[in-house]
Image (cartoon, rainbow, N blue to C red):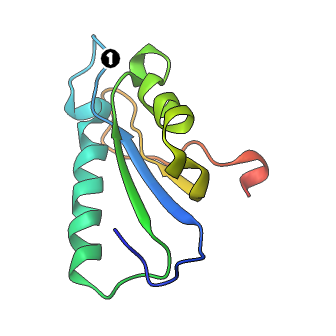
Amino acid sequence: MPGTANSSRDVLITAHYDSAPPSPGAGDNGVSVVAMLETMRVLEAGKPLKNDIVFLFTDGEELGGRGAEAFATEYPSARRVGVAFVFDSEPNSVTTDMRTTSPGDA
């Protein structure tokens, strides 16, 4: 989703759509995918933001984060990311938590 400032860093919003074998897919991690889709809808309806927003839907999270790793290592645009919001939920949970931030919460 393009922003208005060409020189700003990108904002990455990501969630995985695969699920762990013992969990229902909605608990891990379908609810986060839906939250991302709703975020896209709301942002698209408003004025453009300053920063570009990158929405990354990954798989392979249950196998060691392979989808996110592929994005980080294979796509040049990953170098433009200044902050990432990683939505995830625990199996059998009803909430979506932000459990990971950059080192030192930077």
Q: Is residue 26 left or right of residue 88?
A: left
* Residue that extends furthest to the bottom in the rendered view of this protein: 47
Image quarter where the C terminus lies is bottom right
Give above or below for 55 relative to 31. below
Q: For the residue labelled by badge 1, is the local secondary structure a helix, a strand or a loop?
A: loop
How far across and how far down the image is residue 65, in percent? Answer: 48, 24
Q: Is residue 93 left or right of residue 61?
A: left
* Residue that extends furthest to the right in the rendered view of this protein: 104
Q: Is residue 89 left or right of residue 35?
A: right
Q: Nearer the viewer, residue 41 or 20?
A: 41
How far across and how far down the image is residue 30, in percent? Answer: 23, 37
Question: Is the residue marked by circle 1 packed among few (<14), some (14-19), or many (20+) residues within 10 Å?
Answer: some
Give above or below for 61 relative to 36. above
Q: Nearer the viewer, residue 73 or 65?
A: 73
* Residue that extends furthest to the front in the rendered view of this protein: 76
Please report the residue visible at 28 percent of the width from the left and 11 percent of the height from the top: 22
Q: Nearer the viewer, residue 16 or 20?
A: 16
Image quarter where the N terminus lies is bottom left
Q: For the image shown, how many numbered marks are present on the structure?
A: 1
Give above or below for 63 relative to 58. above
Q: Name the quadrant containing residue 29.
A: top left
Please report the residue visible at 63 percent of the width from the left and 48 percent of the height from the top: 101
How far across and how far down the image is residue 105, in percent? Answer: 72, 54
Please report the residue visible at 32 percent of the width from the left and 88 percent of the height from the top: 47
- According to the image, label 1 marks what residue? 20
Q: Nearer the viewer, residue 80 or 98?
A: 80
Report the amino acid beneath label 1: Ala
Q: Is residue 12 left or right of residue 31?
A: right
How far across and how far down the image is residue 57, in percent? Answer: 32, 41
